[in-house]
Image (spheres, grey):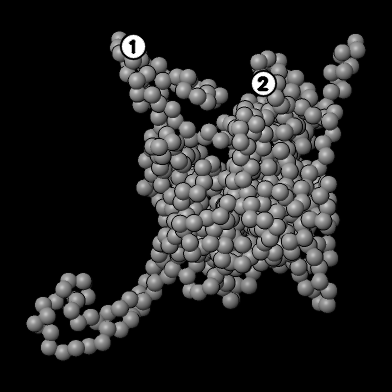
């Protein structure tokens, strides 16, 4: 009954934290800190190793090439980026719709 | 603006909306910055596609004293292009992070626009005459055979249809390893600062090949990184003073007269935290996403995830006022973390004209504005302590009809016309708002539309 009462009086932020930890038990001990800071600094970083890429291509000749999952937490080149993964990189030649 | 009630007597009405109606928003059309120029005549927007669109207010119709001029497209240009840094294997977005106008010195207008890495000074000039009557050229540009010229005439300028041209006059590049989040023009109108996650640089507007580093918080060992710079701004009157905010909710005020490298702050503004309330989310939601000085320079306003705080520059240990923007989100932090909304960077702004002379007295009104979700935006009247929630939606678009205030029901029984927290659309965020420097006209950007509201004129 004691723990039940503790949960009831938990401030909303701590209750939300408990929810998150329940979903992701491996979440870093550091409070929301350096992990997301490093991600912020590495925005735009693309990792590519042509050797790995060609080896993977050779191995998977008959299978489909692995593509990047929707995992947002991927910071380093754990997977082999393929041309299909890379987003289209062309500038906007079209006029903004605000001016239309 | 009548009555002694102060700014809260403002009745906001829809004026205009710019942008596409369709729900399918192209990435490039996402508005990333909105800024009025110093007179309020021009309104600039930047988007994720690297484009700048400038609107100009029509001259007021002398016969129709009931309406202010509308904003129409004046100029549009591609400011930045996507780039790839092959040396660092880094993709550089063309998204315009900030636009800042220079005060007008001559017929042309100048603005600074920046993406993550490069700042550009753009000159926007009008051409309304062209030379005609050349001796060696036909009117269509073809060259005449000189031997056919028998008489000479003096070319003259004749009027032509107005053409507005934008040209890049300076490119300030290669000074930022990390991503630029702010630019701010100094009150000396000769220099400006640019801030990235770890460093702040000082530039002279005329000089592009040199920049002075004035703040560097990069630790010797990146493993020790605990804090990044999130915004920076020069003091409006004191040309040696600037502030920068951090991801830990602190603001540092620095004086460039103290030393060349302002790593040691002159003042540190930080509100003490209640240790019993500390959670995984505390630091993330305390991260300051915007800092803005008041026009007098006596106060500054900061925006963190859930609130707006007003600080008196003379008091470092806590803000003088705190306004809750959407406190009901505190019990939704888990899902807001999962969908990344907790990292949304909301901006804030002060009202423009903060003084109104009426008869023999001077009324000071002070209102701050910021955005929220579901295309809601909030205003806080610092004098009356009243606040209001309004919505930027095409459903309210009848000119001169006063906008109806909105209310979010945090818990319990939802009254008619209220919206429950779970029904809020978190994809509809208002991150960027701007207030005309002299009139009660505001520009509010939804994802891909720009709304202009003005107060009801009687």
Query: Residue B5's x, y, as percent?
Result: 83, 62
In the rendering, which numbered label is found on residue B184? none
Badge 1 or badge 2: first in the primary sequence: 2
Residue A22 is drawn in which quadrant? top right
Q: Cβ–Cβ below 8 Å for labels 1 and 2?
A: no
Q: Residue at x 73, y 61 (%)?
A: B297
Location of the N terminus of chain B by quadrant is: bottom right
Judged from the image, the secondary structure of the residue bearing numbered disc 1 is loop
Residue B373 image position (x, y, % from top left):
65, 39
- Above or below, comparing residue B310 to residue B168 in the picture: above
The x, y position of residue B303, in whole percent, is: 71, 45
* Image vertical order of residue B19 relative to residue B63, above or below: above
Q: Give me the disc on residue A28.
A: 2
User: Given the image, what chain letter belongs to the residue carrying mark 1?
Assistant: A
Q: In the image, which is nearer the foreground, mark 1 or mark 2?
A: 2
Q: Is residue B317 left or right of residue B74?
A: right
Which of the 4 image quadrants contains residue B104? bottom right
Find the residue positioned furthest to the left. B147
Which label belongs to residue A60?
1
Q: Residue at x 42, y 60 (%)?
A: B168
Question: Marks 1/2: CA distance?
Answer: 35 Å
Q: Measuring 63% from the left and 37% from the top, which residue is drawn there?
A: B219
Work out whether residue B25 or residue B324 is closer to the camera in this orientation and state it. B324
């Amino acid at each position: 009954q004691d723990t039940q009462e503790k949960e009831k009086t938990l401030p909303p932020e701590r209750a939300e934290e408990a929810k998150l930890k329940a979903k992701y038990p491996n979440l870093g001990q550091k409070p929301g800190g350096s992990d997301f800071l490093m991600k912020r600094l590495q925005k735009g970083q693309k990792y590519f190793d042509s050797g790995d890429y060609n080896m993977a291509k050779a191995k998977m000749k008959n299978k489909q090439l692995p593509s990047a999952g929707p995992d947002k937490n991927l910071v380093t080149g754990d997977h082999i980026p393929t041309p299909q993964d890379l987003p289209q990189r062309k500038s906007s030649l079209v006029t903004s719709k605000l001016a239309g | 603006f009548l009555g002694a009630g102060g700014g809260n007597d403002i009745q906001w009405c829809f004026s205009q909306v710019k942008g596409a109606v369709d729900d399918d928003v192209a990435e490039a059309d996402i508005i990333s910055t909105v800024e009025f120029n110093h007179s309020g005549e021009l309104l600039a927007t930047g988007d994720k596609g690297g484009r700048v669109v400038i609107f100009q207010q029509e001259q007021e119709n002398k016969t129709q004293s009931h309406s202010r001029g509308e904003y129409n497209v004046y100029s549009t240009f591609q400011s930045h292009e996507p780039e790839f840094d092959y040396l660092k294997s880094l993709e550089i977005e063309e998204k315009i992070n900030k636009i800042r106008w220079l005060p007008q010195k001559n017929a042309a207008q100048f603005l600074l626009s920046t993406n993550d890495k490069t700042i550009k000074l753009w000159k926007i000039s009008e051409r309304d005459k062209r030379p005609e009557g050349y001796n060696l050229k036909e009117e269509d540009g073809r060259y005449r055979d000189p031997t056919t010229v028998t008489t000479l005439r003096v070319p003259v300028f004749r009027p032509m249809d107005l053409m507005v041209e934008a040209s890049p006059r300076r490119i300030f590049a290669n000074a930022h390893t990390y991503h630029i989040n702010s630019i701010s023009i100094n009150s000396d109108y000769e220099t400006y600062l640019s801030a990235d996650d770890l460093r702040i640089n000082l530039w002279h507007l005329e000089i592009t090949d040199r920049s002075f580093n004035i703040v560097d918080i990069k630790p010797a060992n990146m493993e020790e990184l605990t804090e990044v710079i999130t915004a920076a701004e020069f003091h409006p009157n004191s040309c040696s003073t600037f502030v920068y905010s951090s991801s830990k909710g602190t603001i540092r005020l620095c004086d460039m007269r103290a030393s060349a490298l302002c790593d040691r702050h002159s003042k540190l503004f930080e509100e003490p935290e209640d240790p019993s309330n500390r959670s995984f989310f505390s630091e993330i939601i305390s991260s300051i996403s915007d800092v803005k000085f008041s026009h007098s320079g006596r106060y500054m306003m900061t925006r963190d995830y859930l609130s707006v705080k007003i600080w008196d520059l003379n008091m470092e240990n806590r803000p003088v006022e705190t306004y809750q923007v959407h406190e009901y989100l505190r019990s939704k932090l888990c899902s807001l973390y999962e969908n990344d909304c907790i990292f949304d960077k909301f901006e804030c702004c002060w009202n423009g004209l903060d003084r109104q002379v009426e008869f023999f007295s001077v009324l000071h009104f002070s209102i701050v504005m910021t955005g929220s979700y579901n295309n809601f935006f909030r205003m806080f009247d610092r004098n009356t302590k009243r606040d209001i929630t309004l919505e930027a939606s095409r459903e309210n678009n009848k000119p001169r009809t006063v906008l109806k205030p909105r209310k979010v029901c945090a818990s319990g029984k939802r009254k008619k016309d209220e919206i429950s927290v779970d029904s809020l659309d978190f994809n509809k965020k208002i991150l960027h708002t701007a207030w005309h420097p002299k009139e009660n006209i505001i520009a509010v950007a939804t994802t891909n539309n720009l709304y202009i509201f003005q107060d009801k004129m009687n």
